[in-house]
Amino acid sequence: MREETDVIVIGGGTGGYSTALRAAALGLGVVLVERDLVGGTCLHRGCIPSKAMLHAAELVDGIAEARERWGVKATLESVDWSALTATRDDIVSRNHRGVEGRLTHAGVRVVRGSAALTGPRAVRIGTGDEAGAEWRARRGIVLATGSRPRTLPGLEPDGARVVTSDDALFAPGLPGSVLVLGGGAIGVEYASLHRSMGAEVTLVEAADRLLPLEDADVGRHLTRGLKKRGIDVRTGARLEEARPYDGGVRAVVRTARGELRALDAERLLVAVGRVPVTDGLGLAAAGLATDARGFVAPADWSRLETAVPGIHVVGDLLPPPSLGLAHTSFAEGLLVAETLAGLAPRPVDYAVVPRVTYSGPQTASVGLTEDQARERGHAVRAVTMPLTATAKGMVHGQGGMVKVVAEGDGGRVLGVHLVGPHVSEMIAESQLVVGWDADATDVAQHIHPHPTLSEAVGEVMLALAGRGLHQP
């Protein structure tokens, strides 16, 4: 017997459950299929537990700063790893219960099991060893199965000596040394976390700078900040081989100069990206296929609908320009749910999605880099200001910068790039500035509070408008 509902969502991560909640709020019947835990990677293995740990790391760093910079005679006796992880797990658990409660309250039917497409509007949902029931979706099917860490040939994670970002937080104890492979956001965050917790950290990135997709000045300032903290940053370096042994891992890295260097560490953390999860999804049965990189590309980006009408995609299954970020998948879920309900929502504007790295120092960006703006033919003026040019930046004493890329003198703001303490909390203003095509001259009319870090953004806008007070 085949059961029916309006919408079937496959995958209960951020993209999946946001689709389900919005569709239910619009009066649609929704079945959400999840084979693991609702909340997905972000809640259970990624965003939430890692940021909880990074907050603890910030507290540890604060003790050292209090003693060394401010004369507060504080000392760190030890890190109680079990207590720290218990707090992290409690935060995750409470969020998990909250998501489940919201789904129940919204009337979403959550089915624990695996789902496979059997046709353009048909899904087989299996639970445990049972073959499962056939379901039909009257309005549509949403694919939201997420991604998993990319691994390297011959270097299989074992959860102890060789780990990925999915299991790094749950590996046993605190290592004395870590080799982080990959200088993107995930690698940088984990390098920062382990350094705060006392580990000797080497960060290896094949590109010529960290965060290679960000503005070049962001990579430079971030590298400076990490090196100041004692992290050995090696860019333009490639892993040649790595061999686990009883005491850890020995890696051989080819430097930018072509020299081979052996690096030993208790733990190797592989953070070289993520790949979409489509195993067992039955794409072919519905007339779908992945592209060469494993993504399920939409035929219509305005609706995130595939070439098979009624099958939509959200989250990490999407290729660029989708960014594989949790906050992007929330927006994608809203878009698809409203589309399935017969509304006409605005497409997701990927050009103005904020990008944040929660390391020490943090980075936050929105819009075009300086190089991208020039490549697209804009007449660019870019102004950079160190955060230490402001009183609050001096108080924090962690360096950093604000960089604004604009058209001409005081013209349209094309991109904003921040490095420094708490800049993740500063980027929302700049998202509105870039998203609403505001001119720097217009933004300069708005008064930023003093003393704050945010006034550095205001000061750069004043400089672009020809009215700067402190800009050199």
Image (cartoon, rainbow, N blue to C red):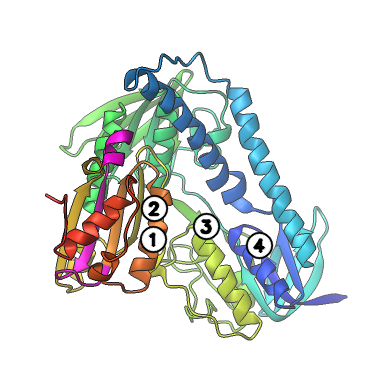
Q: Is the Cβ of the residue at disc 4 closer than 8 Å to that at disc 1?
A: no
Which mark is in front, 4 or 2?
2
Q: Amino acid at mark 4?
A: Tyr
Q: Residues within 10 Å of mark 2 (few under 14, many from 20)?
A: some
Q: Which residue is mark 2?
A: 426
User: Any mark on residue 353, and which?
Assistant: none
Q: Badge 4, how many Cα within 10 Å: few under 14, some, many 20+?
A: many
Residue 178 x, y percent position in the rendering:
41, 27
**How many angstroms separate mark 4 from mark 2 (CA)?**
27 Å
Question: Residue 414 is drawn in which quadrant?
Answer: bottom left
| Percent of width and height locating residue 154 | 44, 39
What kind of element bears circle 3?
Answer: helix
Q: Mark 4 sits on what residue?
A: 17
| Cα distance between the residues tagged 3 and 4 | 11 Å
Q: Is residue 340 visible?
A: yes
**Disc 3 or 4, which lies upstream in sequence?**
4
Using the numbered discs, state the Cα–Cα distance from disc 2 to disc 3 in whole angstroms: 18 Å
Q: Magenta region: which residues?
A: 391-413
Image disc number at residue 429: 1
Residue at the disc numbered 3: 326
Contact? badges 1 and 2 (CB < 8 Å): yes
